[in-house]
């Protein structure tokens, strides 16, 4: 599988208008911090590709937060780094993000969130209402005893919400007689580049995997002007490149360790502050780039991940989810996230090959493991969005 090549990937979708806005944005800050916490937590439990969406995890936690009390609530607030009482504002920032998943030509950004509860329980009206208002979340009742029908219902719903891109998110083995409540989050992203790669320029090239073995993969090539920078922290050097997607709302930030540096060394450096520095310090420059064409999808059991962020109460009997339903024997059995991202040549404008570019000595050749971040650059425009 091609996806096994990268062995280390970071996917974060967050409202990060940090470089353009002098006003610090608590939600964006919190999301970056959560991204970093989750990344390090996941890194301990997964040995291969790491692709996850902190946005998705944040949304699931917030869905639960709306119905959680006491210890359960406190743990969530701590994991999300919420201070004080600015919930309203934070929720509205999430709403802005949701408006992104609208019908746009430039990119496909499908986001599906759902909370499935065992039939027979009664969901509080207030909870249904706030979830709909903030998260466009589906709250659904299913019969977990009928494992096959249940898995099918969940998978079909996710498939529909992601235009067929994310299939089989759950299987019937995941439910048991004690299952009462599960959380589901699915994200699919595929954007068109601002500047298109020419398919004729894509060639098979050698890629050195983390274990040192070499394989051939299709590598896309392009010369362009993009935000770029060389960094060195604690003698660990690497390059950072930001490739804009069409429509300015998203870009892909790639972090490539220098040849004599391992990906682990770069991973160890990652902090929320460092990510912000990357965004702030890269400068427009001419760069010759070679990056793999790829599609990766990964299912993450968020329960384990959240455990390492000290969110445990919501997964244990006796937790207080009385904001969701009155019954006391309700806790979350599973939190499943599936993320899929596709990167290929597609873009809006062909690379202007006739344009004279300064002879660039900047080369960005991703022929070894790299990290990437899907960055959301809120435009401030509120686009009309439909919920369906
Ligand atoms: C859950 O929390 C609410 C609000 O703090 C409290 O009124 C209720 O008694 C708690 N329920 C349980 C079972 O502890
Ligand atoms: C970086 O490498 C140089 C030369 O090897 C060494 O003198 C210096 O102490 C190193 N700095 C750090 C922060 O490791
Ligand atoms: C979880 O709790 C332990 C023990 O209190 C603490 O050492 C650790 O830093 C916490 N982890 C996170 C991510 O907050």
Image (cartoon, rainbow, N blue to C red):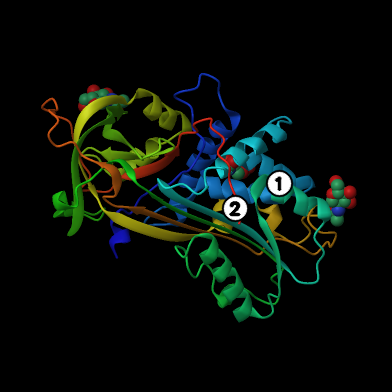
**Residue 213 at least partly seen:** no
Image quarter in which the C terminus is found: bottom right
Q: Position of residue 48 (x, y in %)?
A: 36, 57
User: Of 67 and 318, which appears nearest the observer?
Assistant: 67
- On the image, the x and y values in percent for residue 7 come to 33, 54
Distance CA(mark 1)–CA(mark 2): 28 Å
Residue found 33% across the figure and 39% down from its top:
266
Which residue occupies the foreground of this view, 359 or 306? Answer: 359
Residue 338 lies, with reference to residue 237, above or below; the image says below
* Residue annotated with mark 2: 307
Displayed quadrant of residue 322: bottom right
Disc 2, SS: helix
Q: Quadrant of the N terminus?
A: bottom left
Decide which of 172, 140 is in the foreground and name it: 140
- Farthest top residue in view: 22
**For the image shown, how many numbered marks are present on the structure?**
2
Closer to the N terminus: mark 1 or mark 2? 1
Q: Residues within 10 Å of mark 1 (few under 14, many from 20)?
A: few
Q: Identify residue for label 1.
A: 133
């Amino acid at each position: 599988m091609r996806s096994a090549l990268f062995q280390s990937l970071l996917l974060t979708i967050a409202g990060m208008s940090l470089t353009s806005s002098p006003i610090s944005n608590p939600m964006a800050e919190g999301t970056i911090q959560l991204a970093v916490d989750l990344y390090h937590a996941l890194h301990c439990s997964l040995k291969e590709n790491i692709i996850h969406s902190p946005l998705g995890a944040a949304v699931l936690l917030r869905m639960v937060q709306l119905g959680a009390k006491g210890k359960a609530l406190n743990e969530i607030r701590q994991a999300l780094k919420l201070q004080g009482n600015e919930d309203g504002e934070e929720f509205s920032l999430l709403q802005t993000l949701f408006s992104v998943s609208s019908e746009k030509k430039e990119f496909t950004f499908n986001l599906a969130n759902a909370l499935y509860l065992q039939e027979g329980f009664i969901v509080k009206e207030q909870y249904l209402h706030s979830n709909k208002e903030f998260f466009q979340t589906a709250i659904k009742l299913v019969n977990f005893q009928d494992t096959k029908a249940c898995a099918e219902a969940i998978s079909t719903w996710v498939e529909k919400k992601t235009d067929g891109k994310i299939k089989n998110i759950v299987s019937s083995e995941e439910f048991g007689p004690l299952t009462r409540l599960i959380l589901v989050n699915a994200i699919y992203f595929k954007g068109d580049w601002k500047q298109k790669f020419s398919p004729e320029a894509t060639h098979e090239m050698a890629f050195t995997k983390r274990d040192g073995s070499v394989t051939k993969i299709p590598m896309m090539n392009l010369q362009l002007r993009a935000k770029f920078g060389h960094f060195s922290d604690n003698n660990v050097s690497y390059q950072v490149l930001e490739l804009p997607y069409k429509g300015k709302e998203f870009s892909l930030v790639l972090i490539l360790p220098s040849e004599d540096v391992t990906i682990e060394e770069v991973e160890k450096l990652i902090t929320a502050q460092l990510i912000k520095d990357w965004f702030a310090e890269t400068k427009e420059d001419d760069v010759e780039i070679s990056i793999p064409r790829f599609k990766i999808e990964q299912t993450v059991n968020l329960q384990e991940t959240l455990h390492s962020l000290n969110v445990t109460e919501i997964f244990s009997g006796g937790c207080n989810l009385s904001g969701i339903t009155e019954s006391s024997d309700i806790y979350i059995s599973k939190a499943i996230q599936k993320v899929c991202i596709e990167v290929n040549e597609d873009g809006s404008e062909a690379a202007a090959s006739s344009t004279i570019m300064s002879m660039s000595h900047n080369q960005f050749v991703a022929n070894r493991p790299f990290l990437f971040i899907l960055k959301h650059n809120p435009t401030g425009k509120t686009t009309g969005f439909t919920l369906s």
